[in-house]
Amino acid sequence: MGANPRSTVGTVTDVNAMLRILFSRIATPSLGGPRAYSFIVASASGRAPSEADGTREVRQFTVTGGMCVRCEGRGSVSDFGLDQLFDKAKSLAEGALTVPA
């Protein structure tokens, strides 16, 4: 086997890695419930007494927010158009790539 006493036939032949790849391709991941990724979305809720026109009542509020999906919460988007990278009318031999090498 190997120099490590914990080596098995699976580690020496790399079967472990192949099985891991096989099962990762055929498996359906469990994404959890609807709040599984709630850490991405900032939310706040609370109750506060309010008094208006001599009547007193308790108001309840819930604010759901979170990061912008487009900028992923960074505040700026660094997109570029594919037309800036290559010319669709030319082939590679004709110099379709417009990006300097």
Image: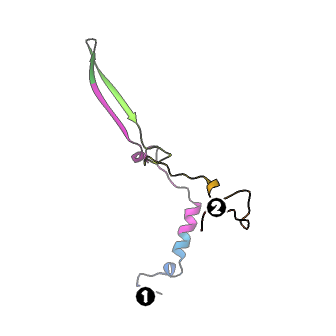
The amino acid marked with disc number 1 is Ala
Compared to 27, does 44 lie above or below? Answer: above
Where is residue 98? Give x, y as percent.
64, 61
Compared to 27, does 9 lie above or below? Answer: below
- The residue shown at (71%, 65%) is 92
Q: Range of the magenta residues?
A: 20-48
Q: Look at the numbered disc 2 and give the secondary structure of its residue.
A: loop
Where is residue 96? Give x, y as percent.
69, 62
Give the left or right position of residue 58, taking residue 92 as reference. Answer: left
**In the image shown, does 59 or 14 lie closer to the viewer?**
59
Image quarter hosting the C terminus: bottom right
Coloring scheme used: rainbow
What numbered label is drawn on residue 3?
Answer: 1
What numbered label is drawn on residue 66?
Answer: none
Between marks 1 and 2, how big is the CA–CA gap?
A: 52 Å
**In the image shown, does 73 or 80 lie closer to the viewer?**
80
Which residue is labeled 2 in the image? 98
Which one is earlier in the sequence, the residue at label 1 or at label 2?
1
Give the left or right position of residue 9, taking residue 42 as reference. Answer: right
The amino acid marked with disc number 2 is Thr
Q: Look at the numbered disc 1 and give the secondary structure of its residue.
A: loop
Give the left or right position of residue 68, taking residue 62 as reference. Answer: right
- The residue shown at (62%, 58%) is 85
- The residue shown at (56%, 72%) is 18
Where is residue 62? Give x, y as percent.
37, 32
